[in-house]
Image: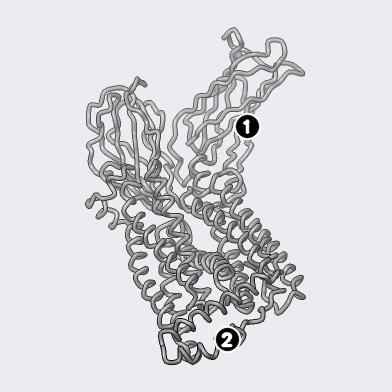
């Protein structure tokens, strides 16, 4: 429905449009400033390092394998497994040791002594602090690489059929919450007479049933979703008990308890409240239901905030209440929109006053959504590169586009609302009067009198609906609201996908490495080989680059150039540049000195930050023939 301020008629439409345009401009400006000045945060755990490193070759068998993560994780007995080339366990199979210090999150497992040479596989699986399962695998070698019978897992934890069902339940839970909270708010704030309308009662009750069923499904599937991926494990009592001991499990149980209170609220709303005829008593009961329902709705919204992205990372004490406000605003807007759609199509009694009151609710909800959405975007994205270059950022752009489309359709709804007037109400006197003889004959028959009363009421309702359906303004509003609801369904699906997607900033950090701490980051020598062809005579060859020790801080860089015949090759000019694109660092120029034929060197090359660095090499073989080649290398 409309996100513009209400008015008594169509004349002030331009003022709300100007306000909406100004609001959109301010939102874009603030959004840009926040992204431009965003610093690193932490949410959705990612593997940031390991010892031994991925692909490393060590001379002697290490005593343990350690893994570092970007945030706190929950681990179990088999969260970290080390397998030898034959696939047998090389670790002691004990629960991983917590080696975390300060802000560094690190876990390790001890290895058996006397491990033979060969390639070892490290497979890990854990639960991020924001409730999402994470997993991965890598290899290292002792002595020298070898063949291995271990097959790295092709399916990440949280995927497969169980993951699909769990994601469907997650979407259904959001949908049920929107209908339950938004429908109840619509009745209490916009259309109190709707408490007696059967379609409105069904809408809210179905929202409660959907949210309850989805929560139960998520609770049962939580164990296989974060573990084996098998439906049969949903009824594993030991696994269910372990789920209840986790933060997501506690949140789901809390939601079920709050839904019990919500059931009592619904019973009062559509029972005692609907039957209350005294306006003063009904006003007092409205206030009580609004306070009680608001507390329950806030509690249900908090079950998401306390277990997902808002509960971890920077400013969690601010992010959680902001997330609650965001969810409540979504429910008030989209749930109210669904309620209005049902009222326009299924009930004949809703008037223009109720529609205009919802216009005010929608406008307020959009303001809250804009403010909370900007803050959430800053926490989860953090930079323009993450906004455009990650799946989370692309979904966020899609969500913003859908909201813009929803607001555009809402503008048309607002225009219809401004023209809307209440149709002439068909009074009972206008109904077909029963013949006097029949009235006299049924006066002594109470059952017959009641039956005729019901028939007259149905006839009156039918006439009311026919008149209002013929109203072009009301028909236009119904079509516009239907279009809004269709966009809202897609918007809710995108929002659900965002909650289960790794935030853009964390994905970027994982791909490019974490910022260097006060101590140099661990790393290993970098060896690169890049063929080139300048296009001129004797312009083909190979560049070999060594960077030692291959970590943050000072490094020595050596470059060898071999001709097409494999012999050392001199060139008139050689230049290098290092760029960390994920952090917008560089290009950092490196001009090596010639040491011998085909051999150049540069010392004290500073690598300021660990990450996936792009190394550009420019080779000139004549006055006019040159080429620039590049290759990425993980440093640090």
Residue lying farthest to the front in this orientation: 437
Q: For this view, does 34 lie left or right of residue 380?
A: right
Q: In this view, does 296 lie above or below 27?
A: below
Residue in front for this viewpoint, 510 or 429: 429
Tally of marks: 2
Q: Is residue 103 above or below residue 16?
A: above
* Label 1 with label 2: CB-CB less than 8 Å: no
Which of pointers 1 and 2 lies earlier in the amino acid sequence? 2
Determine the secondary structure under disc 1. Answer: strand
Q: Gap between marks 1 and 2, in whole Å?
A: 93 Å
- The quarter holding residue 333 reads bottom right
Where is mark 2, residue-wise? 433
Q: What percent of the width, then of the height, locates residue 629?
A: 63, 25
Q: For this view, does 417 lie left or right of residue 381?
A: right
Q: What percent of the width, then of the height, locates residue 606?
A: 55, 36
Q: Which residue is drawn at 56% across and 71% down?
A: 343
Q: What percent of the width, then of the height, locates residue 344?
A: 59, 69
Determine the secondary structure under disc 2. Answer: loop
Q: Can residue 368 be seen in this view?
A: no
Q: What percent of the width, then of the height, locates residue 58?
A: 35, 27
Q: How crowded is mark 1: few (under 14 residues within 10 Å), some or many (20 or more)?
A: some
Residue in front for this viewpoint, 60 or 411: 411
Q: Residues within 10 Å of mark 2 (few under 14, many from 20)?
A: few
Where is mark 1, residue-wise? 577
Residue in front for this viewpoint, 533 or 103: 533
Q: Can residue 426 be seen in this view?
A: yes
- The quarter holding residue 340 reads bottom right
Residue lying farthest to the top in this orientation: 565
Q: Which residue is drawn at 37% across and 36% down?
A: 51
- Quarter that holds the N terminus: bottom right
């Amino acid at each position: 429905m409309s996100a513009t301020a209400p008015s008594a008629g169509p004349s002030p439409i331009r003022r709300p449009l100007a306000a909406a345009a100004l609001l959109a401009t301010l939102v874009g400006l603030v959004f840009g400033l926040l992204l431009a000045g965003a610093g690193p945060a932490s949410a959705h755990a990612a593997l940031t390092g390991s010892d031994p490193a991925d692909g490393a070759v060590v001379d002697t068998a290490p005593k343990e394998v350690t893994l570092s993560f970007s945030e706190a994780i929950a681990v179990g007995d088999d969260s970290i497994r080390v397998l030898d080339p034959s696939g047998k366990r090389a670790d002691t199979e004990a629960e991983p040791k917590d080696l975390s210090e300060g802000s560094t999150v690190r876990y390790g497992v001890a290895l058996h002594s006397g491990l033979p040479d060969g390639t070892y596989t490290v497979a890990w699986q854990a639960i991020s602090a924001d409730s999402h399962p994470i997993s991965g695998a890598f290899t290292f070698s002792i002595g020298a690489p070898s063949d291995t019978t271990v097959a790295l897992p092709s399916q990440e934890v949280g995927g497969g059929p169980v993951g699909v069902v769990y994601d469907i339940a997650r979407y259904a839970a959001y949908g049920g919450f929107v209908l339950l909270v938004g429908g109840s708010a619509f009745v209490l704030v916009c259309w109190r007479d709707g408490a007696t309308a059967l379609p409105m009662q069904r809408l809210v009750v179905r929202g409660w049933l959907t949210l309850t069923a989805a929560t139960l499904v998520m609770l049962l599937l939580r164990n296989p979703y974060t573990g084996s991926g098998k439906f049969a494990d949903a009824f594993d009592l030991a696994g269910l008990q372990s789920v209840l001991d986790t933060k997501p499990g506690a949140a789901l149980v809390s939601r079920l308890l709050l839904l019990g209170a919500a059931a009592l609220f619904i019973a009062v709303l559509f029972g005692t409240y609907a039957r209350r005829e005294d306006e003063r008593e009904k006003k007092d009961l409205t206030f009580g239901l609004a306070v009680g329902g608001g507390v329950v709705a806030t509690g249900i919204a908090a079950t998401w905030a306390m277990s997902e992205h808002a509960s971890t990372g920077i400013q969690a004490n601010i992010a959680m209440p902001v997330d609650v406000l965001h969810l409540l605003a979504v429910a008030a807007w989209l749930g109210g929109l669904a309620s209005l759609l049902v009222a326009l199509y299924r009930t004949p009694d809703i008037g223009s006053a109720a529609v205009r009151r919802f216009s005010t609710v929608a406008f307020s909800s959009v303001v809250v959504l804009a403010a909370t959405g900007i803050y959430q975007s800053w926490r989860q994205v953090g930079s323009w590169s993450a906004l455009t270059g990650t799946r989370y950022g692309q979904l966020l752009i899609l969500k913003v586009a859908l909201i813009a489309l929803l607001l555009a359709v809402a503008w048309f709804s607002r225009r219809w609302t401004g023209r809307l007037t209440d149709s002439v109400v068909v009074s009972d006197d206008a109904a077909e009067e029963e013949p006097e003889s029949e009235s006299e004959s049924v006066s002594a028959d109470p059952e017959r009198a009641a039956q005729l009363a019901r028939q007259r009421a149905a006839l009156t309702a039918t006439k009311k609906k026919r008149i209002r359906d013929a109203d072009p303004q009301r028909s236009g509003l119904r079509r516009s609201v239907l279009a809004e609801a269709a966009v809202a369904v897609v918007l809710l699906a995108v929002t659900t996908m965002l909650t289960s997607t790794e935030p853009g900033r964390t994905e970027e950090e994982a791909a490019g490495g974490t910022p260097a701490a006060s101590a140099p980051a661990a790393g290993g020598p970098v060896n690169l080989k890049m063929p080139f062809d300048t296009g001129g005579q004797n312009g083909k060859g190979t560049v070999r680059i060594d960077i030692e020790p291959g970590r943050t801080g000072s490094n020595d860089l050596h470059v060898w150039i071999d001709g097409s015949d494999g012999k050392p090759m001199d060139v008139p000019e050689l230049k290098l540049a290092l760029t960390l694109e994920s952090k917008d660092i560089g290009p950092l120029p490196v001009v090596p000195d010639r040491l011998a034929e085909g051999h150049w060197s540069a010392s004290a090359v500073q690598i300021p930050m660990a990450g996936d660095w792009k190394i550009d090499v420019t080779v000139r073989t004549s006055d006019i023939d040159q080429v620039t080649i590049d290759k990425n290398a993980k440093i640090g």
